[in-house]
Image: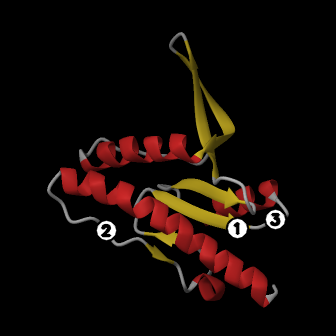
């Protein structure tokens, strides 16, 4: 990996973490709790693992790259998530908005089907994250499997 690629990856991880922190903070503070400190996983090159630490149920992999390799990145995100974590892939190209890939659930007239992959925009992801954090803090998180 070239130095420029590493720097771009690091800045992408910091950028995405900075987007997540106020959302996470608001949910925790609304319940009178101290928010967790979200941080980059600086040991990932030594021992592997996902990129953003601090949200217990989420294994967040971040990619800031011009050339998309979504299937490869999605496989990486899924393999790095623990059984009780939701694999999440956040990715962005230059001059493009953030996108998020994760497992999805399709529901029509009360019938639920698990989708293997859902690619969503950042606003939708942050809405989902807010609701998931609220459920988690209220003790209603239940078990989550890989998609």
According to the image, label 2 marks what residue?
36
According to the image, label 1 marks what residue?
64
Residue at x-position 69% and y-position 39% = 116
Q: CA distance from mark 1 to mark 2?
A: 24 Å
In the depicted structure, whether residue 3 falls above or below residue 61 = below
Check whether the beta carbons of the residues at disc 2 and disc 3 lie within 8 A of each other: no
Check whether the beta carbons of the residues at disc 3 and disc 1 lie within 8 A of each other: no
Q: Please provide percent x and percent y for residue 64.
A: 70, 67
In the rendered structure, the answer to whether residue 110 lies left or right of residue 22 reads right
In terms of secondary structure, where does tag 2 sit?
loop
The C terminus appears in which quarter of the rendering?
Answer: top right
Query: Toward which corner of the image does residue 34 lie, by quadrant?
Result: bottom left
In the rendered structure, the answer to whether residue 81 lies left or right of residue 20 reads right
Q: Going by the picture, which residue comes out furthest to the top?
A: 109
Q: Going by the picture, which residue comes out furthest to the front?
A: 95
Q: Is residue 46 visible?
A: yes
Q: Going by the picture, which residue comes out furthest to the right?
A: 67
Q: Please provide percent x and percent y for residue 66.
A: 81, 65
In terms of secondary structure, where does tag 1 sit?
strand
According to the image, label 3 marks what residue?
66
In the depicted structure, whether residue 123 falls above or below residue 82 = above
Task: Specify few, some or many for label 1: CA neighbours under 10 Å numbering under 14, 14-19, or 20 or more.
Answer: many
Q: Please provide percent x and percent y for residue 83.
A: 52, 56
Residue at x-position 77% and y-position 85% = 4
Q: Please provide percent x and percent y for residue 94.
A: 75, 63
In the depicted structure, whether residue 47 falls above or below residue 109 = below
Task: Specify few, some or many for label 3: CA neighbours under 10 Å numbering under 14, 14-19, or 20 or more.
Answer: few
Q: CA distance from mark 3 to mark 1?
A: 7 Å
Q: Earlier in the sequence, mark 1 or mark 2?
A: 2
Q: Earlier in the sequence, mark 2 or mark 3?
A: 2
Between residues 35 and 66, which one lies in front from this camera angle? 66
In terms of secondary structure, where does tag 3 sit?
loop
């Amino acid at each position: 990996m070239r130095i420029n690629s590493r720097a771009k990856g690091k800045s992408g991880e910091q950028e995405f973490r900075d987007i997540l922190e106020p959302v996470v903070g608001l949910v925790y503070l609304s319940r009178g709790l101290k928010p967790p400190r979200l941080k980059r996983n600086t040991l990932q090159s030594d021992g592997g693992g996902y990129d953003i630490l601090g949200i217990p149920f989420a294994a967040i992999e971040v990619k800031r790259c011009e050339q998309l390799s979504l299937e490869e990145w999605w496989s990486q995100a899924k393999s790095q998530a623990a059984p009780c974590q939701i694999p999440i892939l956040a990715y962005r190209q230059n001059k493009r908005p953030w996108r998020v890939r994760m497992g999805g659930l399709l529901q029509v007239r009360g019938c639920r089907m698990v989708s293997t992959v859902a690619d969503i925009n950042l606003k939708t992801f942050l809405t989902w994250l807010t609701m998931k954090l609220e459920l988690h803090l209220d003790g209603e998180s239940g078990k989550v499997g890989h998609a």
